[in-house]
Amino acid sequence: MRTVRDIMQTDVIAVRQGASVQELVQLLDQEGVSGVPVLDSEGRIRGVVSRSDVIRLAARDREIPVAEAFWEGIGRSVDGDDDDPDAYFLAPESSVMLVPGSSGLEGLALDETTVDEIMTPVAFTVDPQMAIWELAEFLVQGRIHRALVVEEGRLTGIVTAFDVLRVVAGDASV
């Protein structure tokens, strides 16, 4: 029976408490990951922070109220007559709009906000001996994308829903 230890990533990318959201965004982009654990100066887990947390920050600080007049001339024609592939239809009931080609982060003080302010202050942890089917159930029940692997109180790895999918898909490299 395969376990978490068989599929976990041991080279854990993390961010330190007190790091700016700007540093976080650069780290996530550079490493191509969607979230990381937040560690204190002694390496203890303090939480988890992800792209979703950054998006929530952007939405909270930069929300654009929607007005019906705003939608005139923007939406793709409902009857399909509009052949312009660059036209977008956004539902008027949406409360936030992100414009294609824009990160939505311009103008935010990302260097003045710390990861501590936006992180989830708890971390979902698993034991390296947990069976993969138990891990899958854990991720689904928790509606989470990643779990930190902890052994004897120490962070030893990270495992993601994608790691589980690779096992299900029969990827021999795992």
Image: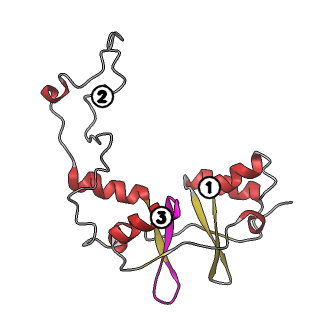
Of circles 2 and 1, which is in front? 2
Question: Which residue, given by chain and number where applicable, does mark 2 sit on?
Answer: 91
Is 75 one of the magenta-colored residues? no
* Comes first in the chain, label 1 or label 3: 3
Circle 1 SS class: helix
- Asked if disc 1 and disc 3 are in contact, CB closer than 8 Å, the reply is no
Q: Identify the image quadrant of the N terminus.
A: bottom right
Residue 6 place in picture, x, y as percent:
78, 65
Examine the rendered structure and indicate whether residue 67 appears above or below residue 54.
Answer: above
Q: CA distance from mark 1 to mark 3?
A: 25 Å
Q: Is residue 45 left or right of residue 121?
A: right
Of circles 3 and 2, which is in front? 3
Examine the rendered structure and indicate whether residue 47 appears above or below residue 146.
Answer: below
The magenta stretch spans which residues?
Answer: 30-45
The kind of residue tagged 2 is: Ala
Examine the rendered structure and indicate whether residue 82 appears above or below residue 129.
Answer: above
Question: Which residue, given by chain and number where applicable, does mark 3 sit on?
Answer: 30
